[in-house]
Amino acid sequence: MPENRRPSRRSTPDAQQPTAPAARRSALGALPPKAPRPPRSRAALRAHADLLFARLHAAYPDAHCELDFTTPLELLVATILSAQCTDKRVNLVTPALFARFPTAEALAAADVAEVEELVRSTGFFRNKARSVVGMARALVAGHGGAVPREMDALTGLPGVGRKTANVILGNAFGMNEGVVVDTHVGRLAVRLGLTRETDPVRVEQALVPLFPRERWALLSHLLIAHGRAICEARVPKCSACVLADVCPRVGVVRAT
């Protein structure tokens, strides 16, 4: 008598579909092979930092500030407007703004309501308009309308924090006074095992000793470029990453 057997799952159409957990893993994407541990000693961290910089520089040789500007004032205004807004959007807005208010004196005398309309599409336009006009008034009153070259003077202006000041000093004046830490830089600094800090000021403090001073401004551009192109916030493209074999992938739970 033939032996009674349970039907094989392979013989049923449903069996050809992945189970729910497998389907979920497939949808999320598998991580690349096991990541190396983050370096711990100061010497190992510096060697790791040197390698990361070299590879990123080779991958993004043209990395630069993507805000359009021709003067320090234009970059300062554009950087204020870029908060929680893309550089591309800001670059669409600033030509009309700068044509209407080409100098600090003109911007200082501007009607805030008019500035609001010009910058509306950047989001949070009321706060940004007040900051831009207030900054211009402070420039005229305290600096003769010129953008200062000192960190303390810049951060004393309305709407200007340390990140914005670092952008201005590094890109308008070619001065390496610090590392610009935006969301991309902060995220990558942790994933790459360079720091465990998440506060922007502490992230900057952790990065500065690891890289030569002359690299600070460019470092930000490289990390931002890589964050936009590959190391995205939700699902990084680890399989296409030039750092895949040396990146600890701290905090990464899914990738492609």
Image (cartoon, rainbow, N blue to C red):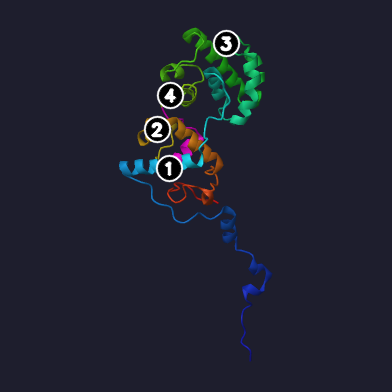
Label 3 or label 1, whichever comes before in sequence order: 1
Q: Mark 4 points at which residue?
A: 175
Q: Earlier in the sequence, mark 2 or mark 3?
A: 3
Which residue lies at the image location 36% right of the left edge and 46% below the top edge? Answer: 39
Tell me the CA gap for discs 4 and 1: 22 Å
Labelled pair 4, 3 in contact (Cβ < 8 Å)? no
Which residue corresponds to the image point at 60% horizontal and 59% vertical from the top-left? Answer: 23
Q: Write down the quadrant of residue 86 in the picture.
A: top right
Identify the mark nearer the N-term, 1 or 2. 1
Q: Name the residue under label 1.
A: 52
How much space separates mark 4 and mark 3, taking CA atoms?
26 Å
Secondary element at image label 3:
helix
Q: Mark 3 points at which residue?
A: 108
Percent position of residue 141, x then y: 50, 7
For the residue pair 71 and 126, the one nearer the viewer reads as: 71
- Counting from the top left corner in percent of width and height, residue 137 is at 53, 11
Residue 22 drawn at (x, y percent): 57, 61
Residue 115 in sight here: no
State yes or no: discs 4 and 1 in contact (Cβ < 8 Å).
Answer: no
Q: Is 211 in the magenta? A: no
N-terminal-most mark, 4 or 1: 1
Q: Decide whether residue 179 is among the magenta residues.
A: yes
Q: Distance between the residues labelled 2 and 3?
A: 34 Å
Query: Mark 2 is on which residue type?
Result: Arg
From which residue to which does the magenta span run? 178-192
Residue type indicated by callout 4: Met
Q: What residue type is labelled 1?
A: Leu
